[in-house]
Amino acid sequence: MNIRCYLKPSCGWSNGVRAIMAKYALNYQDVDIINSPTNYAEMVEKSGQRLSPCVEIDGVMLPDISGAEVEQYLLANKLVAPNDKAPAVPIDAPCTDAEHEKMRVKTIRFF
């Protein structure tokens, strides 16, 4: 599979997507949308919206998606086999207060 994940470096939703990639040992590109205006613009162009995370799997864009939803997509389309491995972090959770504070310290705006 060709997987590109448009993610924030520190974000509950983004970390949930990473946890699903790890759970199924999937190779993927972790595309930083916070520190690269080009990556962010690419995500917006491909997804048609500004919210993250967005995950592109073999050309199919899954916009504004949680790790739980990515897992559901992978299983429903038989792209992975079910397993009982527990994800390392919550896969359907917003950013923690600590993560919001980190983002507040270093604000980058592209628009």
Image: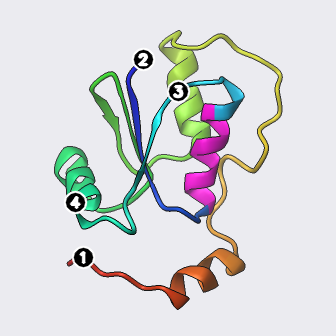
Tag 2 residue: 1
- Identify the residue at horizontal 69%, vertical 80% (top origin): 97
- Identify the residue at horizontal 25%, vertical 67% (top origin): 37
> How far apart in space, not on screen, are marks 1 and 3 (Cα)?
28 Å
Q: Secondary structure at mark 4?
A: helix
User: Percent position (x, y) of residue 111?
Assistant: 20, 78
> How far apart in space, not on screen, are marks 2 and 4 (Cα)?
23 Å
Q: Earlier in the sequence, mark 4 or mark 3?
A: 3
The amino acid type of the residue labelled 3 equals: Asn
What mark, if any, has residue 38 been given in the picture? 4
The front one of 93 and 57 is 57
Pick the quarter of the image with the N terminus.
top left
The amino acid type of the residue labelled 2 equals: Met
Taking 84 as reference, is 3 left or right? left
Tag 1 residue: 110
> How far apart in space, not on screen, are marks 2 and 3 (Cα)?
8 Å
What mark, if any, has residue 27 been given in the picture? 3
User: Percent position (x, y) of residue 7?
Assistant: 46, 54
Per the rendered image, the range of residues in magenta is: 12-21
Q: Earlier in the sequence, mark 2 or mark 1?
A: 2
